[in-house]
Amino acid sequence: MARYFTIRNPAILRNCFEAIREMGLNARVTIAPEQRSSDQNAFFHSICSDLAKSELKFAGKRRSLEEWKVLLVSGHAVATGTQGEVIPGIEGEFVAIRESTAKMSVARASSLIEYALAYCAMNGVEITETRKGGFLSDRAVEPRKAA
């Protein structure tokens, strides 16, 4: 039987140690930062949706939610010093190997969301879906007005 502990206080830490002692040998213990939450996932997807519904073009055309997700994850990786990789694909196309948002820590997902919100603000993108989803107050992010 698998048991998971999110260590938030000394009592949970003691329970975790006790569970490890009770397991004995031939068991696996993984210690990792907490992964991004479903709320963070929904928040990020709402931002990508706002970008897809906007008039903003990238590389000469409007992009889908999925394309904005790839662009933001890639841009965030470069901006934070985590380089991705572009490799030849099976049919000779080029494929960007990028970080998985599902495997991001809570802190990394927060950083990605901040990056995406900043990108929207810098490009005048209204974040209506994000606000409708309850992720932001009305004054949290103001898009920059075009000159």
Image (cartoon, rainbow, N blue to C red):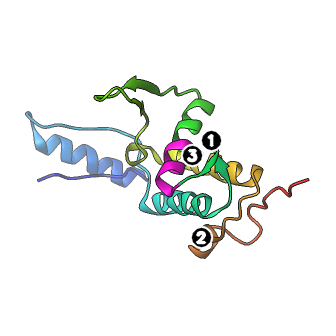
Q: Which residues are magenta?
A: 64-71
22 up-or-down from 140: above or below: above
**Spatial CA span between label 1 and label 2:** 24 Å
Amino acid carrying mark 1 in the image: Ala
Q: Is residue 6 magenta?
A: no
- Which residue position is annotated with label 3? 112
**Number of numbered callouts drawn:** 3
The earlier-in-sequence mark between 2 and 3 is 3
Which residue is found at the position 74% from the left and 61% from the top? Answer: 141
- Which residue position is annotated with label 2? 129
Q: Are the residues tagged 2 and 3 within 8 Å (C-beta)?
A: no
Amino acid carrying mark 2 in the image: Glu
| Secondary element at image label 1 | loop
Which residue is found at the position 57% from the left and 59% from the top? Answer: 52
The earlier-in-sequence mark between 1 and 2 is 1
| Secondary element at image label 2 | helix
- Which residue position is annotated with label 1? 59
Q: Closer to the camera: disc 1 or disc 3?
A: 1
Which residue is found at the position 40% from the left and 50% from the top? Answer: 10
